Image (cartoon, rainbow, N blue to C red):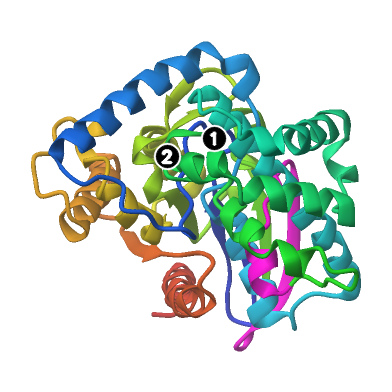
Amino acid sequence: MSLDFNSSETHGIIGLIDHLKFRMFCCSNDRRFNFYRNEAEKREILRRHVLLTKKLKMKNCRLKRRGPESGKSTIFKQMKILHMNGFTDIDLLNYRYLVYSNLIQGINQLIEGAKLMEIEISSDVVEDVATITNYYQTTHPAELELTPMLALHIRRVYKSEFIVKTLKKQHEIVLLDSAVYFLENLDRIAENDYKPNHQDILRSRVPTTGICDIEFKYKNMSLRMVDVGGQRSEQRKWIHCFDNVNGVLFVAELSGYNQMLFDGEQTVNRLKYSLYLFKRIVNNKAFGKRTAIILFLNKVDIFKERLAIFPLDVCFRAYSGENEFDATANYVSDRFHSVVAQNMTEVKTVYTHYTNATDTRNIDRVFESCVDVVFRVSMEKAALM
């Protein structure tokens, strides 16, 4: 994403950049479980994680599907809520069908995850599972609808024993972050007069391709925010937008440290790929010598949950500190800061924030800080400070 400042005194751009389009492991933050009772159980979970990673890599052709992003597009939506009077009736209608699609995709992912982990499908819902699977596989994502009959099938399956077992191991499968949230709200979403609320919209997911933008007023400035795709194939479309920018806002999924993604060319660790892309972006000549680099380490809530299961050294083997939030988050932040080219450290400062993109108050507060930073850089460039 990029953000243009237009005022009588300054002109600048913040770029919000996302990199995650394909995911292989995900843990929802909506339903919490006591994942292990002792060290032996924890070791067994980690062993299964390694085995499933190998299985998933072998099944790449089946798992190269778009998943939840790092939160960049959610921040884009937050700007509409905070500074553009929310969403129009047309927007709500579009999001209604997107929520339907996400919900149906979520239950299908749970079914597929159960099969992958060889969890037996409950005999009383075999026909329901077949109906859901057939509908999902034979219908274009944009045409998925939540009919009363389909909602009944989904409700039966979601409450079944095999889905309960699958949810207890949800960190081991491909699953939208919002899947459990939407399934828990199935009755409300299935109502004839359903209109998505702000949380529904913030949690809905659709891949970003190409470039789209919004314009809004912020204090005494007119801002233009541009949402861009982050795949390698997408980067070529937007990198030219960042010539001589005053600031870049890079959104990384902190919780992706034990996940894999397929970036269009190979399967890699999500957080390590984020670090790789951040290095490419922050050291790109297009940003000039004075560019404020703002780093959002996002999905803090999911990251905290994952730390109870997977130590940070599954991603960074050199890490030897405590497996608690402050120590691990600071270590990840330091790794991102360390990739800024040494000859640029005096002119490029990285401003780091820990965020939850679905938390409107959090994003409102952090965004104000980001704008202040970029505004100051813009003023310095104009020699007004």
Q: Amino acid at mark 2?
A: Lys
The magenta stretch spans which residues? 197-221
Q: Quadrant of the C terminus?
A: bottom left
Label 1 CA crowd tier, 10 Å (few <14, some 14–19, many 20+)? many
Q: Which mark is residue 169?
A: 2
* Residue for point 64% across, 19% down: 62
Residue 216 on the magenta segment: yes
Label 2 CA crowd tier, 10 Å (few <14, some 14–19, many 20+)? some
Residue 377 location (% of width, % of height): 43, 69
Residue 233 location (% of width, % of height): 65, 28
Residue 138 on the magenta segment: no
Would residue 336 be found to the left or right of residue 323 on screen?
A: right
Q: 347 or 15: which is nearer to us?
A: 15
Residue at the front extreme, as displayed: 124
Q: 259 or 139: which is nearer to us?
A: 139
Q: 40 or 5: which is nearer to us?
A: 40
* Residue for point 25% across, 45% down: 36
Between discs 1 and 2, the one toward the N terminus: 2
Q: Is residue 225 visible?
A: yes
